[in-house]
Amino acid sequence: MTRWVVAACALACLAWSATSGVPKCEDARAQLEYASKRKLELRGARGEERAAARERAVEAYRAVHYHFPRELLARAEAAFREGELRRAGGDVDEAREAFESAAALGAGSEFRARGRLELGHLYRRSNRWIDALNAYELVALDEDAAPRHRDRAWLWRARLQARLGREREACAGWEHVALEGFDSFDRLEAFDEWALHLVERGDLEGAAGVIGLCGELLAERLAEQTRQGDRLRRVHARMRSVERLKAAIEARRKLREAEEEERARETRLDQGRAPRRPPDALEVPRPPLPWRPLRVGDPDRRAKAYAVGVELELRSGTGTLRLEVPADRLRDAQRVDDAPAEVDVERAFTELESAGAFADLAGSRVELLVVDGTRPEPPAQLCEHLLARLAPAARLRVLLCTGTHDPATPANRARLDVWRERVARMSPRAEVAIHDARRDAFRRDGTTSRATPVELPVAFDSADRFVVLSDVKHHYFAGYSGPAKHFLPGAASVEAVRANHAFALERAARAGHHPWHANPARRTNPVAADYCEAFELALRGRPAHALVTIGAGGPLAWIGGGELPEVSARAFDACDRLGAFTAAPAPILVVETGGAPYDDDLYTAQRALELSREVRAPGARVLWIADCAGGIGPPSAREHFVDLLARPLDEARRAERSSYALYSHKAVRFADYLADCSVALASRLPAELVRSIHLEPTSDPNALLAHWLADDPRAEVLVARGAAHRLHLAR
């Protein structure tokens, strides 16, 4: 029977050879060489001549399968070369089939990995993201694949993960190649893309750390006096991330200077001095505005713009987005209190000392709680002054409070290095640690009246007192960020955080409400009440003090010190006066998240919608400006945030506290927000992802706003500036 099959195959091959015009060579290698010569005929050919030459080369490679069916490796190479020809000719389906054959036949050769890489590229170009990821992953995890192919797969997989908003997976891929890659050029490319990604999402410190690590780990190869060493040095000198980082640092510097200038201008106004006016400005009515352009152009042009249309510069990521609004349609939001900033550092430390924070330090073990790398910290001089005052303690331990954030991110590692350097200079005996909600050892201090387990680090048992360095701003469901949150969720276990955050599903969990608020009417908030009770249980009678600021990351607007509950209440009052705005609800609301780091990703940026939700009229149209260069947020949030939000809105809103999963409150509150308004998002997120979560992507906010205004000639536009860190209340 076998002889008949072989004979039949031989006859079929002879028939195919006669019709194709491809002769049979003496062996498979010679057949491949013959096909390679046919491929060379494409050089210099154009139009129909080139297409015909391509078909002849394809037939020549296909002859390998017909003439030598048992030579699997030769067939794998032939299939791969056919795939290259098909792809170059635009025959995507035929190319995919050829690369699939190469991968299937190529076990033990380079063409399995190369075929899968090309499949990944085809899927990626066709927007078949998941298929592309799977193809790249097969190569990345294939131990038989050549190291250079595995590294390329890791790199392409990281790029695609970043495009899909999976920031953590993307950074892990770049880090893998950068630290463990086979080829120095691939490693350099991974370092460059990793740092570039961090720059784009506003993590300049993390980017600088990655660039420095690159120079350190590749120093030996960069110093080689060889042709390859020369080439590597040239590539290293052209790293895109270095120039982008320099530009971003300069932009940050200019932004801070502009903010300082704005504060100085507001101070002059408060003191009764009129603002400076351009000498040639036209006398036109100018509506009161809650903002000031970062760059002022030609005075005549600017005056005419006020008369016809106002050009706003809205912060998006590390840059700006220009939006034009008719002057007579623009509405103003008023600050609750125009009182000047209250920054008296000496008084704040006196308050701390009077409250007993520095008493008997020589016999005390002190736990100093500070923020992690995801949040701006107070000025370095303030941090170091507090550290110096606590240095005489018998034992000092500094803990970076991460909550459920990953402690190993570049931003957190950079912040940890900063504190280690400070401690080494100012208090060498002190310890520095970073919280890990999933791996640390915890001790249970009972449960709250709402059944939340109070699980905090075992290391807290050895502390005699606590000092917290904290910034305060409005928090969309916890009332305010502040010192007490450094215990729960800041230093708590995942289970404790999950139980506490489940109360975010309740409508009473909202910004500006806290059990320690001076106004009795604003003391109901189940999330805040729960973590404050946990704080009291954790203390077990031990003292807790706090140095509290408002405005960390920029010029401070307020500072105070004292016992933790007392100074928190004063900070909440100052936060309401300095950081809250009021306006009548508007039919068109423009929400400027506030730029990096507030709009680094969708998960973080959502707070801007929450803090401005009171000033949208029923059925409002909302234009949301959020760069989201970091994608959707932490990978752990995908299932219970984006995937849940992608369901029908009614289904997402029905989540119950008893079945609450960490992060799902984001989706529930988002779905509730969308129930009575429509939201258009100007961001870097893929349009298909934005539509999947019931938002409308827009790449032209000006055209969209013009359409809305034309659709409703009487509608006014309210702009909520810096909404991620400013509470907007309805008046």
Image (cartoon, rainbow, N blue to C red):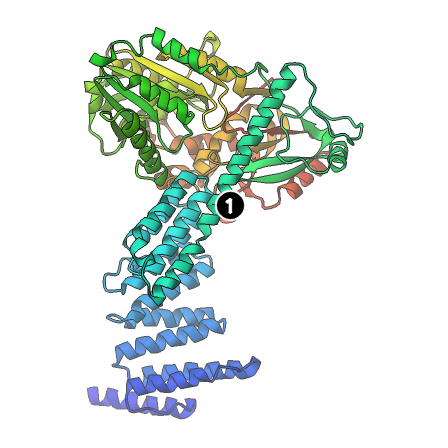
Residue at the image point whose x is 52% and y is 35% from the top: 253
The quarter of the displayed image where residue 74 is located: bottom left
Q: Amino acid at mark 1?
A: Arg
Dot 1 falls on a residue whose secondary structure is loop
Q: Along the horizontal axis of the image, is 510 left or right of 409?
A: right
Residue in the image at 32% along x and 26% along y: 490
Nearer the observer, 73 or 466? 466
In percent of width and height, residue 398 lies at 28, 25
| Figure quadrant of residue 227 | bottom left
Q: Quadrant of the C terminus?
A: top right
89 or 304, which lies in front? 304
Determine whether 1 is above or below 710 in the image.
Answer: below
In the displayed structure, does residue 552 sit left or right of residue 660? right
The residue that mark 1 highlights is 684
Residue situated in front as seen by the camera: 132 or 251: 251
**Is residue 711 shown above or below 515?**
below
Q: Is residue 676 visible?
A: no
Residue at x 56% of width, y 28% of height? 259
Instruction: For the N terminus, give its image quadrant.
Output: bottom left
Q: Total marks drawn? A: 1
| Residue 588 point in image, percent of width and height | 63, 31
Q: Position of residue 319 (x, y in %)?
A: 55, 40
Q: Is residue 417 above or below residue 543?
A: below
Q: Residues within 10 Å of mark 1 (few under 14, many from 20)?
A: many
Q: What residue is drawn where x is 31% and y is 78%? A: 75
**Can you give x and y, in whole percent of width and height, for residue 580 in the image?**
54, 20
| Residue 137 visible to the viewer | yes
